[in-house]
Image (cartoon, helix red, strand yellow):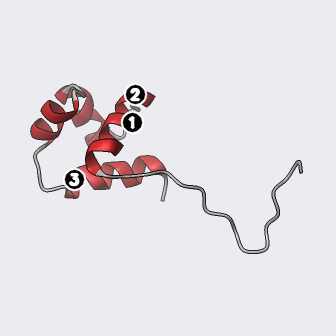
Amino acid sequence: MTVTEQLRRAVEEYGETRYQISKATGVPASVLSRFVANGQGLRSENMDKLCAYLGLELSAKKKAGEARKGR
């Protein structure tokens, strides 16, 4: 599942309306609605606001036995 899909799902399942999330985060309601409805992209600062509000954190997941490249 992509980051976009995870964020879209989190918005849908948060328990508040898109309007409430919009007002709390400062992300315009129209932008949030288009993002959830058809996956239209978000600016990184809007993604940051949504993730902070929804309690989401991006973290790397290393595959078992995989070494870091370039070191």
User: As rendered, which of 63 and 55 lies closer to the eye?
Assistant: 55
Badge 2 element: helix
> Up-down: is 46 above or below 71?
above
Q: Amino acid at mark 1?
A: Asp
Q: Which residue is mark 2?
A: 45
Q: Which residue is mark 1?
A: 48
| x 27%, y 49%: residue | 54
Q: Which residue is mark 3?
A: 12
| x 70%, y 68%: residue | 63
Q: Amino acid at mark 2?
A: Glu
| x 79%, y 73%: residue | 65
Residue 2, position as x, y percentages in the image: 49, 53
The first of marks 3 and 1 along the sequence is 3
Q: Is residue 20 left or right of residue 3?
A: left
Whole-angstrom CA distance, mark 3 to mark 2, is 20 Å
Q: How many marks?
A: 3
- Specify few, some or many for label 3: CA neighbours under 10 Å numbering under 14, 14-19, or 20 or more: some
Q: Is residue 26 left or right of residue 59?
A: left
Q: Is residue 21 left or right of residue 36?
A: left
> Up-down: is 21 above or below 15?
above
| x 25%, y 34%: residue | 32
User: As rendered, which of 42 and 69 lies closer to the eye?
Assistant: 69
Q: Nearer the viewer, mark 3 or mark 1?
A: 1
The first of marks 3 and 2 along the sequence is 3
Q: Amino acid at mark 3?
A: Glu
